[in-house]
Amino acid sequence: MDFLVLIFENRGLLDVTYKDGSGSEHGIYETYKFALYLYALQATGSYYYGEEDNIFRLQGPDGGFHTGYDQIGTYAGTRENAETTSIVITAISSLSTTSRSPSHPSPSRHG
């Protein structure tokens, strides 16, 4: 978790693919990684209400989730797929059992 917190920056994970990926991968956050990050936060008791808001912006009109997004939160030409959608659904389903409290301050890792 320490490493994930370190590479998370407001919208997504600044991993090797984001920083040094080829062509269409460079500068694109991966939706499934963000979903898994939220899932890990929930599993470790580090989740704060509202962190999932950005992930819902990545849902297409037919219900599927796009594979990637850019700094401003647009789909960045990515498509929806079953794998990403299933990971997102698993992650957000786990959040429904999380004790949510809007009064929690946002941790400093979210800058």
Image (cartoon, helix red, strand yellow):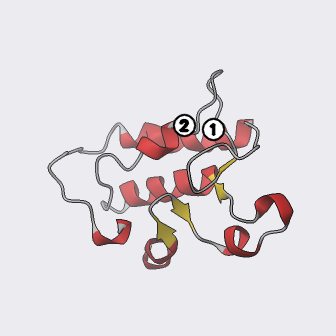
- In the image, 81 versus 39, the foreground residue is 81
Q: Give the farthest residue toward the right.
A: 23
Against 6, residue 59 (above or below) is above
Q: Which residue is mark 1?
A: 86
Question: How far from the left and from the top, in percent, is residue 24?
Answer: 81, 58
Tell me the residue at 76%/43% (across/down). 77
Q: Give the farthest residue toward the front.
A: 72
Tell me the residue at 18%/55% (across/down). 104
Tell me the residue at 47%/67% (across/down). 9
Q: Give the farthest residue toward the top.
A: 62
In which quadrant of the rendered view does residue 84 lie? top right
In which quadrant of the rendered view does residue 41 lie? bottom left
Q: Is residue 102 left or right of residue 70?
A: left
Q: Residues within 10 Å of mark 2 (few under 14, many from 20)?
A: some
In which quadrant of the rendered view does residue 29 lie? bottom right
Q: Is residue 4 left or right of residue 46?
A: right
Q: Give the farthest residue toward the left.
A: 103
Q: Is residue 84 left or right of residue 101?
A: right
The amino acid sitting under disc 2 is Ile
Question: How far from the left and from the top, in percent, is residue 89?
Answer: 54, 37
Question: How far from the left and from the top, in percent, is residue 71?
Answer: 58, 57
Q: Which residue is mark 2?
A: 89
SS state under label 2? helix
The amino acid sitting under disc 1 is Ser
Q: CA distance from mark 2 to mark 1?
A: 5 Å
- In the image, 27 versus 81, the foreground residue is 27
Numbered mark located on residue 56 in the image: none
Against 85, residue 2 (above or below) is below
Q: Residues within 10 Å of mark 1 (few under 14, many from 20)?
A: some
Q: Are marks 2 and 1 in contact (CB under 8 Å)?
A: yes
Q: Is residue 104 left or right of residue 96?
A: left
For the N terminus, give its image quadrant: bottom left
